[in-house]
Amino acid sequence: MRDRFGRLISYLRLSITDRCDFRCRYCLPRSHRDFLTPREWLDPDELARITRVFAGLGVSHVRLTGGEPLLRTDIADIAQRLSTLPGIDELSLSTNASQLSKSAQRLKAAGISRLNISLDSLDAARFRDITGGDLARVLRGIDAALAAGFAPIKVNMVVMRGVNDDEIDAMVDFCLDKGLALRFIETMPVGHGGQQAQRHYLPLGEVEARLKRRFRLSPAAMHGSGPARYLQVDDSALRIGFITPQSQHFCDTCNRVRMSASGTLYLCLGQDDNVELGQLLRAGADDAQLRTAIVDAIARKPQRHDFLGAPSAVLRPMSALGG
């Protein structure tokens, strides 16, 4: 399945809830209350059916996201259904890890192969200021994921000037010690929280230059790297990724689409063009009609986002699509 620019679309990011137990300042404003109701979320059967249609069109990698996907009590059922679909070669999950200590083993057993974990600070007070969450619970979740055998585990740090950029070296040391991969991410002006965070925007070229003064960095590859550009640290196993949607956008190689918890298919994180697959499904559409709707939507996928030209164009919170 290719779009009009020749990009092969093989990756579906599937939000299963827009709710989250954190309120990260760049993502979900603490005043936000406009959430979907659970009845609006696609259920495991509906998620499996839509994913099966995507798989028939060539999608082979699905990532479960939120909000915080582990807030769904049926997460293991969802994962088991999706991981066994023909054509789905990889099922991964993005999480803040707050619920991970009690669910890591059953997620592994259900077929989730890789984890991305958000971690923006190693200081408990600062972590609570950025996210509203409990750092100790996240660290316990990371340890539980390691014990369950997840590998690789990627830690995602949104780097913000004057907020947490003084912790870059500490995060590198933490990931070296734990055997984790590390990815630095630039802020994105998506939703009110993202637009407010733009005043702390830090281009990751500065971070790379800083790290080169301490380490020998060499180009490296990593499975499932997506938009990240990876460097190996000295002769260690640590890979550091740089995700640069603003300073060096990667739209030319975009291979993904995103679907909200209610089944709205978005063609670009930085645009609002969409198609309501969930409504079609619940109105009685058969698989052929869903397939046609998806193919027609992919034909409209934009060439690139417009974060720089229209930074306030996307008003939905980042949590609605999992980033």
Image (cartoon, rainbow, N blue to C red):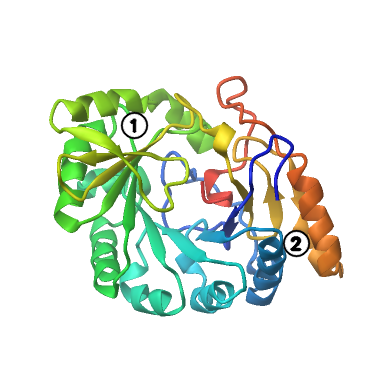
Quadrant in which residue 168 is drawn: top left
Q: Position of residue 212 (x, y in %)?
A: 19, 27
Q: Kindly identify which numbered label has been placed on residue 131.
A: none
Amino acid type at circle 2 is Gly
Name the side, left or right, on which 191 lies relative to 227: right
Q: What residue is pinned by disc 1?
A: 160
- Give the residue at x 53% y 78%: 80
> Along the line of sight, which residue is nearer the eye, 36 or 150?
150
Q: What residue is pinned by disc 2?
A: 278
SS of the residue at dot 2?
helix
Amino acid type at circle 1 is Met
Q: Position of residue 40 (x, y in %)?
A: 69, 65
From this view, report whether residue 281 is shown above or below residue 211.
Answer: below
Quadrant in which residue 37 is drawn: bottom right
Assess disc 1: are there few (<14), some (14-19) or many (≥20) residues with their C-alpha within 10 Å of its C-alpha: many
> Along the line of sight, which residue is nearer the eye, 94 or 149?
149
